[in-house]
Image (cartoon, rainbow, N blue to C red):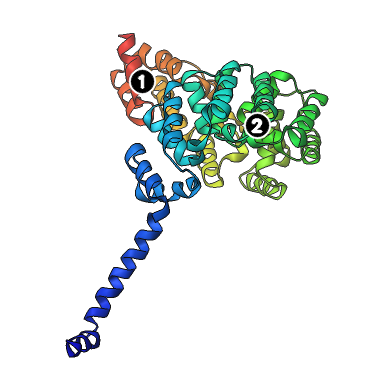
Amino acid sequence: MVLLLKKLFRSNILYSCTFRFSTTTIIHSKTVPKSHSIVVDYLLSRLGFSPEKAAWASKHLNHLKSLEKAETVLYFLKSYGFDESQIKKLVSLYPQALCCDVERTLKPKFEGLQGLGFSGQELAHLILSNHMVLRCNFERNVRPKIEFWRGILGSVELLCKLFKAKQWLLNASLELRVLPNLALLREVGVPDERITLIVQRHPRLVFQKPDYLKALAKKIEGMGIPHESSMFVWALSILMKITMTRFHAKLEFMKSLGWSEVDFLSAFQKNPIFLTVSETMMKKKIDFLVNEAGCKLSKLARDPRLLMFSLDKRLVPRHHVMQVLKSKGLYNGNFSLGYIMSYSEKKFVKKYLISHEEKVPELLDWYIANSKGGAHSNSGLKQKEK
């Protein structure tokens, strides 16, 4: 027997088997800690967690001595409209929720949120996107912030959308940046309705260092955009995202395409968002608008909206439609590219395609096929008008 064992060790057979067994044991012990096996089994069977997720979550529940409290929490969440998938998501984000005392911790917070206007799925979505409300002191931290942002936005619906999109919002301090920045915006003349838009669309603006925001506002006014202009907010947002080095690089690029510095600043004053268009796409759009559509460069500086429209989905298809109508004698005189491109899809299709469908029946079908992304809505319009 001894000689047989020696031969097995020499041939590495027994060593290999022993190593594989040990490795499997180690891996299993890391994935499912023995001391947490009750919790892990609960997460696997009750909530449908994967073994890896259950092992991770169990590390936050090592002090859970029984599953009675966890069951009470699940029952409580269901009573407030949480479905199975939402409960699973909450526990996967915040496993400690299963340890919360329902009567002393969860119930007062849920009732407080209901008192602030959240109910049903709005309440569930708020907690799923901002589970910090379960961790923080409700009266000192959560309630004041929700009341503040609701006062800015004016409705719980808008608040839910904002909190869902910007999950960091409830974690941020109001006193250090938000309140000073809002005071600065009001001081320079930005009306409250525009401040609401800032919070909705560019919330990071009000979380900048106050000195930085003040310097940026001064710089934008020096570029010819007054604080009361509707473009002021957009200019703030754009210059917050790009450095001044990048701003000047854009200037030099546009000059290489034929603009003067005056043209560039004029376009920036009218629509600073054009700076977000990539240089490759900008070159293609200007080439089409100038060489194909006959638009002058100076016109683009005065109406930079044209540079914001999609080349393939709007500029090219609509220009083609107008050229066909002119060639058929169905549209007399010159048309303004700015107006044509600014029409809503519904209005453009109705005015220039459906109204001429009997004389140019193939044009609407061509437009539907070539204005990518608009085919479904155009077809619906066609059927509705008929």
Taking the view exactly as shown, the residue that stands out farthest to the bottom is 3
Which x, y percent locates residue 285? 52, 38
Residue beneath disc 2: 137
| Dot 2: element | loop
Q: Pointer 1: residues within 10 angstroms few (<14), some, or many (20+)?
A: many
Q: Quadrant of the N terminus?
A: bottom left
Task: Give how far apart the Cα atoms at labels 1 and 2 are.
Answer: 52 Å
Question: At 33% across and 64% down in the image, what residue appears?
Answer: 25
Question: Given contact means CB atoms under 8 Å apart, are the residues at marks 1 and 2 in contact?
Answer: no
| The quarter of the displayed image where residue 79 is located | top left
Q: Is residue 32 above or below residue 63?
A: below
Q: For residue 378, which numbered disc appears in the image?
A: 1
Q: Quadrant of the C terminus?
A: top left
Dot 1 or dot 2, earlier in sequence? 2
| Dot 1: element | helix
Q: Pointer 2: residues within 10 angstroms few (<14), some, or many (20+)?
A: few
Residue 272 can be seen, yes or no: no
Which x, y percent locates residue 30? 40, 59
Q: Label 2 amino acid?
A: Asn
Q: Is residue 34 left or right of residue 362?
A: right
| The quarter of the displayed image where residue 6 is located | bottom left
Q: Label 1 amino acid?
A: Asn
Residue 187 can be seen, yes or no: yes
Q: For residue 227, which numbered disc appears in the image?
A: none
263 or 186: which is nearer to us? 186
Report the mark closest to the observer, 1 or 2. 2
Question: At 42% across and 20% down in the image, what residue appears?
Answer: 326
16 or 103: which is nearer to us? 103
